Image (tube, rainbow, N blue to C red):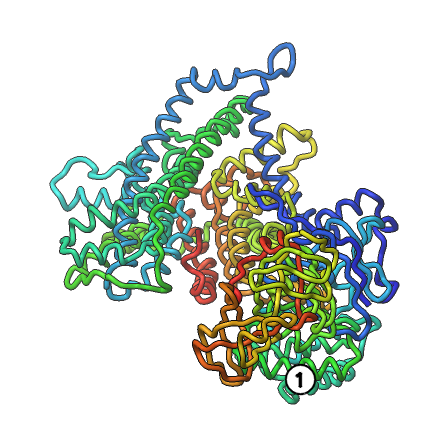
Amino acid sequence: MRGSAVYHAEERGGEALAALRLRIGHAAERLPLPLIAFVTLGLVVVFLVVIVQVSLQVEDDSGTRYGLDNFRLLYTDPFTAKAFLNTAVFAGVALVVAFAFAIPCAWLAERTTLPGRGLVFPLLTVTLLVPSFFTAMGWVILFHPRIGIANKALMQILPIEQAPFNVVSLVGMGWVEGIALVPLAFIMIAASFRAMDPALEESARVHGIPFFTRLRRITLPLLTPGILGAVLYVAAITIAAFDIPAVIGLSNRIHTFSTFVYTTALPLEEVPNYGLIGASSAVMLVVGLLLTWRYMIVIGESHRYAVVRGKDYRANLVDLGGWAVLGWAIVGAVIVFNVVLPLLALTWVSLIPFLQVPSAAAFGTMSLDNFRAVPWANLMTGLRNSVILLVTVPTLSLVAGMAISWLVIRSNWRMARTLDVLAFLPHVIPNLIFAVGAFLLAIVWFPAHWGLFERGIGIIILVYVVTRISFATRMLNSGLVQIHEELDEAGYVAGLGPMGVIRKILVPLLSPTLLYSWLWMALLAFRELTMAAFLASRDNLTLPVIIWSMWTAGRLNQAAAVALVFVGLMTPLIVLYYVFGRRHIGVVQ
Amino acid sequence: MIEIRGLAKDFQRAGESTVHALRTIDLTVERGEFFVLLGPSGSGKTTLLRCVAGLAVPDRGEIVLDGVTVYSREKRVLVPPERRGLGMVFQSYAIWPHMTIFENVALPLAQKRPRLGKAEIRERVSQALSLVGLEGMERRPTPLLSGGQQQRVALARSLATEPVLLLMDEPLSNLDARLREEVRKEIRNLAARLDITILYVTHDQMEAMELADRIAVMHEGDILQQGSPEDLYRKPADPRVAQFFGSTNWIDGRMRDKDAVETAVGCLAVTDSGERTAGEAVVVAVRPEDVELTPHGQEEAARENRFPGRVVSNVFLGDHRVYTVEVGEHPLLVRTLASVLLGGDVGVRIPREKVCVFRARSRDELPSADGS
């Protein structure tokens, strides 16, 4: 309380600042926090605004004007209409497949005596980290109608003339997408199982209602809001999915929304029609927001089903007995389809000169030639870029997330609620939309000669951070809520400033959450293909983009070889994540 | 030491009307005083304390601590808590769980400017710890400490910087009854030993009376009365204050003249009826321990403030008894050491100087006059 410790607002920044300080408490002292929050969330808004703006912008002889011409073009152009129809079929198949596996898996993990059921959750979470375009590559290698080696093998063994499976089709793509989405759907449904009061099932049991009737009349109806919510959320992801359509559909001219936008943005011959990209993205944005809106309503209604329950009350586990084998067969199938089979296929193909069924002759041609032929110099640039992303994206996301979460949870600022909603947007709007927004921003808003793309990976970092901000803030919000506010206040009274409290009290207390979130986001940044592909230029290629472009260029064997190297690089990180994150696995969404 | 002038704060609850957390508070705490803010939950006492700490920001008014304006709406001054140089003990103790006892106590010392040397910090931490009886426990991690020990660490941490003002927010509410008694004594001893001003928040009137030099009783954002514990007990300025300090007999009546009240019990002579005028409806309050029992009934009746009564119930409470005596139709609680027969006739004497007179309307403002 020395005189020097007092400061008068007027001396330090005038009337306005003083009024602000009186209104929002000491927030002015924490200026860096609102600043970081505004910049990050400002980008969220800018990326979306640019899409809307470009979609309404029309170029004609008289110059630039605003109108709905792009949207008209959208539904008069047969190619576009086809792409949207394809997307619907593709997403429909994917949803059916994903939930057909995810619901039983969640039930097995949460409601049965399946031996080792504690492993189901971590195994499927880790599965989520293997890039789904690797899964797609594996499936193409195995089940391409013409060259797929599993198809060929089956034709040799069985008396059939035609390839039994065709993965290069809408249904095939939907199947692979569905398989790749099982872990995500599983995590969401397992959470609803966990939130359900077992007493509701037990009372049915006590009253003599048999198992299948219970399942049909009690368990599933109670889970409906949870499942519906998961379906809507996964649907919003699927309609904008890029990885799998890009690997399977793009080179075979089966376009979904995402690959349609991609080819429109980066056409081989003509001048790209940015208005059309903007319009189709705006449509997808609206569809995504509608799905989210339904999702919010469903989640809101699910509280009707909430029943007071005891702490950590776990009961009513179904004894599977001998059926446990079938249980693990289902979980195993997900892992085999998602990871084991594709990686085996990639390994095999990486060792042979061209696609062929394993045979004595084929084994004779095995060598490391593919690995040697890879343009390693290019790859090292890609690796460098990917490592930069791996380090910067989670770090920046956590810094921004900390600023936003602190304002949301710890300040009484009126803007806080708005910040929270903005930070939630990237969770429900497909990443692809943000990539398109950044792309249009760099091309349309800024002069071409600035070359925002050509200047390295800055723009990719920004987009990644923006799309991760939901995850970071969800994690940090729940972490901060659990820290008693008096711990902060004791810090203030002790003489620590706001930054001091964050550094000395909150960060150490949050360190498990921070470590876990960092690793998770690092892995996602490392494996991300969609956004990097949209924003690719000569200097900012990431490893996944390089692998994918080798694949689309037809160099399947080399792509497979690099994919294996990539998986090798990821493995230690996944192990780290598993070790440090074990306590946290389960709160991914 | 603390001067609070016209302090007000509202809370805007979403979708609800404004809550006046503090209405217009004027308060002065002298140097070296042990000042207690007493009131039920929601009375604004914690908000007031947090405004003094700087953890809450008022809407209007002024706070001056040790001659330094730390908040003034008018002058647009707001000193953040970290620059107010206070000590504070929180209700949850707020011991930082990721630090040892030493680190907890040393952190406020390390923020001091000019910086203290390592050796000095170590010295002052151990001084603070011995002050609260935790000497030699520096290296202990904090999550395993008992409630009482955490409480002591919190106290040591708030005293280590030798602040001139110590704030305490219900520091005993999380301790069990026996420990509470013990720590209460220690706090009183510490306050007497150190030259420190203490602002202390509690909802427990026994705690307040034992610790305080002065008490301010708060209710719905207002200070009802401030004064020494005895003043508040003997001369409550408001029926809610009377109610807050133990049980009271409430008797409705009407002023006959300035010195007498006509009641259901009979005509009561009073010494101080305040600004009441003849004919005004009033309510009088008498403490059960101020009512005297005399052995005989009828013949006493003629004398001042003496009434005949009949004992209708009797509760033995160890060191005293509580009787319910019906005077006329009106039951009176009487607290006494004497032993009288249940059902027997007794004389009741109410000393005129012990009778408090309030406006009749003010009785309706009481939360619930159950007289217990």
Residue closest to the eye, A175 or A166: A175
Q: Position of residue A344 (x, y in %)?
A: 32, 54
Residue closest to the eye, A40 or A21: A21
Q: Position of residue B289 (x, y in %)?
A: 59, 76
Q: Position of residue A63 (x, y in %)?
A: 65, 14
Residue closest to the eye, A359 or A335: A335
Residue closest to the eye, A241 or B284: B284
Q: Secondary structure at mark 1?
A: loop
Image quadrant occupied by the N terminus of chain A: bottom right
> Left or right of A160: which side holds A434?
right
Answer whether residue A370 is visible to the viewer in this image. no
Q: Mark 1 highlights which residue?
A: B132
Q: Amino acid at mark 1?
A: Val
Q: Where B55 sits versus B90, above or below?
A: above
Answer whether residue B371 is visible to the viewer in this image. yes
> Left or right of A47: which side holds A582?
left
